[in-house]
Amino acid sequence: MASIKQYTDRNGQKRYQFQLYVGINPQTGKARKTSRRGFKTQKEATLAASRLELEISKGSFDKKDNNILFEQVYQEWYASYTNTVRESTTVRVPKIFDNHILPAFGKKRIRTITLSDVQRALNQWFKEVKVNYKRWYNFANKVFKYALKQGYITKNPAEMVTMPQRRDGWQRDANKFWTKEQLLHFFSFIDPVEEIEKYTLFRVLAYTGIRRGECLALTWHDINFKQGTLHVNKTITQGTGGKQIVQPPKTSSGRRTIILDHDTVEYLKKWRVRQQRVYLMLGYNTMQPEQLVFANSKNGMKSLNTPGKWLHAIVDDKPELPNITIHKLRHTHATILLEAGASIKEVQDRLGDTDVDTVMNVYAHVSDQQRQNTTDKLTQFMES
């Protein structure tokens, strides 16, 4: 008889599992048990256990590897995968499988999944989203590769798919960044005295190009006022159960020291003085070296959503400003740097990206001013 229990998964969701006696292990002489988990209801777990008991009674359980489901292989693969990546990744991946991959393959016996099945799923994902279809395919392919290694399948049906490609212009987005003029106009809507924290936070994001999580993880120890530098060595991200956690950068290039402009240093100094006064009234001593530069009202980590909420509260009723996301301030920073004459290598170093291709393909949007400069250079050359 199956033993069914309730548990809580990594995302804080209630799930059910069962354990079942399947006989004696001929190698050890000990009782053999098998288990399954991930069921959303007790009824689902009970039904699956009953089916497995029927297999055992018919003597077909020892051939189960031939009938193993994709979702079971996924669970095996994921148990190993969690030991190779950061906690924030282990939280995101199950959502990708639950929402996209398992609906396509989960209940199929993995040995029966064909190239046509994978291609059909890939084509459907391609219709649904602009970019993420490739990521979903890559994760599904990891499970098929694992199944191949384990002997569950004899060939990988995902290897021969035809990867869909967006036509030119599909991903063009007029709102990928702000121009220099638009950025300066944005700051005109924030009072640098009454809203010093907000002004300083956006100043740091726009004038350094650091990521949202890197900005919210900054401590005063990371700011060197004498040298005018900012040291990036950690980031805030989402962990198990939606809890925010602090992690080191993904790569060594993510650890970097950025030279700050004079005005940004001055705003940081002003905000530190204001923070000390305001938080002392709230009962917090902010003179500790690991004090967060941007903290919540309880002197803890701000929500990762806070900068975005602040941004939208400012720009949503400003039709003259394209409605960009917080991350697009990073794009804006890179584009303005290139306009100012910085090299791709210099931009790469400042942003902390691993390779030049990332800068070229993701951040280096060509602005109208750059296009005009290119034309002017050609005209001057031809007329000289």
Image: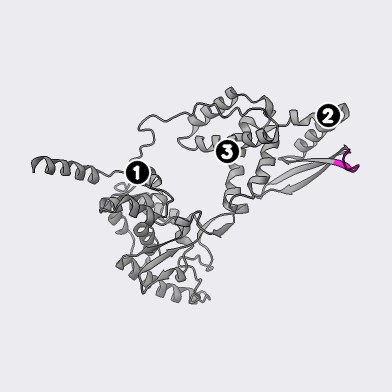
Q: CA distance from mark 1 to mark 2?
A: 57 Å
Depth check, front residue: 207 or 4? 207
**Which residue is disc 3 drawn over?**
139
In the rendered image, residue 185, in percent from the top left (x then y), is placed at: 28, 55
| Magenta-drawn stretch contains 176 | no
Q: Quadrant of the N terminus?
A: top right
Q: Assign a secondary structure to mark 3.
A: helix
The kind of residue tagged 1 is: Asn
Say if residue 108 shows up in the picture: no
Q: Quadrant of residue 167?
A: top left
Mark 1 and mark 2 lie on one chain; the one further toward the N terminus is 2
Depth check, front residue: 172 or 183? 172
Q: Quadrant of the C terminus?
A: top left
The kind of residue tagged 2 is: Glu
Q: Residues within 10 Å of mark 1 (few under 14, many from 20)?
A: few
Q: CA distance from mark 3 to mark 1?
A: 30 Å
Which mark is nearer the camera, 3 or 1?
Answer: 3
In the rendered image, residue 330, in percent from the top left (x then y), is placed at: 38, 52
Question: Which secondary structure class fits the magenta region best?
Answer: loop
Q: Assign a secondary structure to mark 1.
A: loop
Q: CA distance from mark 3 to mark 2?
A: 31 Å
Say if residue 155 shows up in the picture: yes
Mark 3 and mark 1 lie on one chain; the one further toward the N terminus is 3
Total labels drawn: 3
Depth check, front residue: 347 or 244? 347
Instruction: Name the disc covering residue 55, or none.
Output: 2
User: Which range of residues does the magenta coloring cover?
Assistant: 25-32
